[in-house]
Image: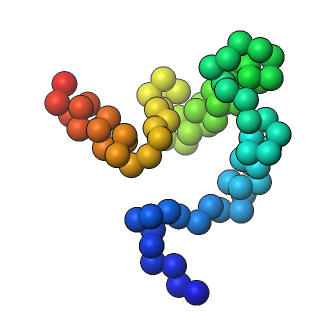
Amino acid sequence: MIYLDYNATTPVAAEVLSAMLPFFTEQFYNPSSSYPEAQAVAAAVAESRKLVADLLGTTSDQVVWTSGGTESNNWAIQGSLT
């Protein structure tokens, strides 16, 4: 099958799914909460932000996770206006 609906959603690479699976099935805690399990997830989010920043040659405070394309576009537009 040739998939041509990338506007709706995209397939997930196997290595990404493997890395994310524990957070979908076992470690689905709110990283903004203060209990230990949630703080472990917060640390994983921070580590992923650092890995992405290193790949992009920037600092982790410059990496922002968004909920999707619309929010990302809004951030980009607002950033270009200020």
Quadrant location, the C terminus? top left
Relative side of 42 to 59, left or right: right
Number of labels in the image equals 0
Q: Position of residue 3 (x, y in %)?
A: 51, 79
Residue 47: image quadrant is top right
Q: Is residue 26 visible?
A: yes
Q: In the figure, residue 36 lies in which quadrant?
A: top right
Return the residue found at the far top.
34
| Residue at (58% x, 87% y) in the render | 1
Q: Residue furthest bottom?
A: 1
| Residue occupying image coordinates x 46% and y 32% | 64
Camera-side residue of 8 and 48: 8
Seen at 48% across and 23% down, the residue is 61
User: Picture quarter containing residue 16?
Assistant: bottom right
Image position of 76 (left or right of 46): left
The image position of residue 73, as x and y in percent, is 31, 44
Position of residue 31 measured from the top left corner of the image (x, y, whole percent): 66, 24
Q: Is residue 67 left or right of residue 29?
A: left
